[in-house]
Image (cartoon, coloured by chain):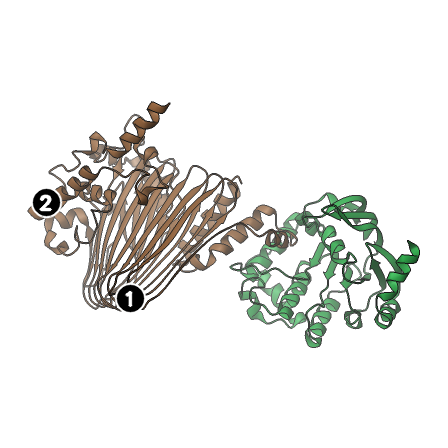
Amino acid sequence: MLSIKGLRANVGDKEILHGLDLEIGAGEIHAIMGPNGSGKSTLAHVLSGRDGYTVTAGSAELNGVNLLALEPEQRAHLGLFLAFQYPVELPGVNNTYFLKAALNAIRRARGESEYDAVAFMRLMKEKLRVLHLDESLLKRPVNFGFSGGEKKRNEIFQMALLEPKLAILDETDSGLDIDALRIVADGVNACRSPERSMMVVTHYQRLLDYIQPDYVHVLAHGQIIRSGGKELALELEERGYGWIEQVTEVAA
Amino acid sequence: MMTSVSNSNASIHAMPNTWLSAAPNQLAGNHMTDIKQARSVALKQVLERGLPTVKNEGWRYTSLRSLLAQNFICTPSDDVLTVNEEAHTAIETALQPALETYRVVLINGRYAPQWSYLENLPSGVQIDSLNAVLNQSPARLAAVFTQIADTAHYPFTALNIASCDDGLVILIDDGVTLERPIELLHVSTGSLNQSVTPPMMHPHHCIQLGTGAQAQLIERFVSIENAGVYCTNAVLEIALSPRAVLRHARLQLESLNAFHITGLHLQQAIGSDYSGINIGIGGAWSRTDLITRFIGEQAHCEQRGLYLVGDQQIMDYHLDIAHQVPNCSSQEQFKGILYGQGKAVFDGRILVAANAQQTDANMTNNNLLLSRNAEIDTKPQLEIYADDVKCSHGTTVGQLDPDMLFYLQSRGLTRSQARQMLSLGFAADVLTTLAPEQLHEQVINQIERRLETATF
């Protein structure tokens, strides 16, 4: 599904990713963990095509297609989805209007027929039930005045609607209380499928109590320094990230 | 080079020679001494003062040069204004969308009964052409025609009064509520014959609402497809009696061959309520003056606006809201979207006279610049002589937030679609006040189409 090889990326003159390798197979959930500043969000942004990052080496392919040469919307058309750590508020842009435009843009790009208003409403109502989202959110401007939890649920709602092949969840747990976290995790779990892969970027282990990963990777100083099963997350929870410094110092 | 610059500056000051004899005897109502007198006073004012230059504060950012270069005929003859059968399909198209209204259509500034619909008007409501009323029963307009407009400060209003021959009259009696909106459509063709000098038209509208009367007016300026060059110099005189309520939508959707001038002179008596929305999308060169005078307390005025200005366009909005009596409130909110080489001017003044205590007034102007070469000159001003008032103004000029663009792109929308969506989002709080729904949709479609084909 996703294949990253030797990826190096800069912000300005500063290299953040120092040759990163990662393979994610179809239907797998991979957790990317690591301390602040390790490059987790940079990885998510580089993959989704945000401005401000320069890829200097390496490759990232989604089902064999070079992602790095594409515009952000073309990546979305291929099936990439980023759930933002800080979803942007769009005053004046109606949520339903936005969601319909996004879904139809992706369907159009894939050569599928567009949804009309009635079919779209039916689909939305079905997806809403899964996420326990209040229907009133759809009538409001996108994320505008939403609580932290509502914003994150709106992200997962979009994921459910757009049905990506690879979803990147960037610190989806940040700013959520335990009830909101559970609802968001339920939503994510409802989206699990053998055809859908996920990259769950998180600082804390607690999200992984609810979204069980197949693999856990530890990212530090722009490289994956350790990979393992879900027990690795528990180890991190116990030991913290302090030991990484020792590991990387020894490696250096 | 120097000579040509100084020559054209000089020519801006003087009225074009062809405009000097702007008031032929046969203009409507001139059989009445006082009307003829008012017209000649107006003409004298504009002749003596000349036309403004960029040295005049109110015209600092908008030069008349391109308008004067067209050599408009100030009082075009009927054969210039009359449209032949061939233009009828184009006119029919320009009238869309069809709304449930009482409809008055002016073609090239002249009342066109065959396109208008005034059946089943309730009693107490009179809607007619200005030409008919001035010629047949001018006394009905005694309190409005030339009585509200400020010819001393608005030279094009003076020129209109000196030259106008037709327009719309709405007179609504005390206590009458007109449920169905009145629609006023200005359809212009321009000079379809290239060899004919383009016309300047002077539609003049008189609107008087009696005590407690209520009405909605939807005013549209449109051009037929492939219209020639023309200039509309419109004036509205609106008198709201005590507690009268007027909702007024104004849409300027003309072709890029059009020059447009509006002077809207509004007078509000005690407890009256005016709410206007001004959409400016079309026209090569447009200037709109919105002038409000409160003459009674507890009156409320709202003026909203949205302008979309791109290549080959200059659009200038001037507001002058005069709180001359206590306890009135006004709110002015204008938003602008600019792209390409588009240029817009927003100049708004709220005047609060010394005795106008308890005035509550607020003016904002927000602008979205979609390209580096677009220009906005914005100048909201408060001029306050009273000491117990609540007044504020604010202005912003900004660009699209790259984070917002990226968010939308990451959801599969192209940059162009994202730009459209965010621009409409920026304008949404103004546009939501635009009714009915078909008009709202028409404006949104036009904005989308313009932004789709625009260069940035």
Is mark 2 in CB contact (under 8 Å) with mark 1?
no
The amino acid pointed to by label 1 is Cys
Vertical order, B75 against A118 (above or below): above
Vertical order, B438 against B22 (above or below): below
Image location of residue B370, percent across then percent down: 52, 45
Q: Residue at x 81, y 69 (%)?
A: A212
Image location of residue B88, percent across then percent down: 32, 39
Displayed quadrant of residue B66: top left
Q: Is residue A134 visible?
A: yes
**Front-most of A217 and B327?**
B327
**Front-most of B199 and A79?**
B199
Taking the image as shown, residue B414 lies to the left or right of residue B201, namely right
Which chain has been coloured green in this picture? A
State the mark number for residue B328. Answer: 1
Image location of residue B219, percent across then percent down: 31, 52
Which chain has been coloured brown in this picture? B
Q: Residue at x 61, y 65 (%)?
A: A124
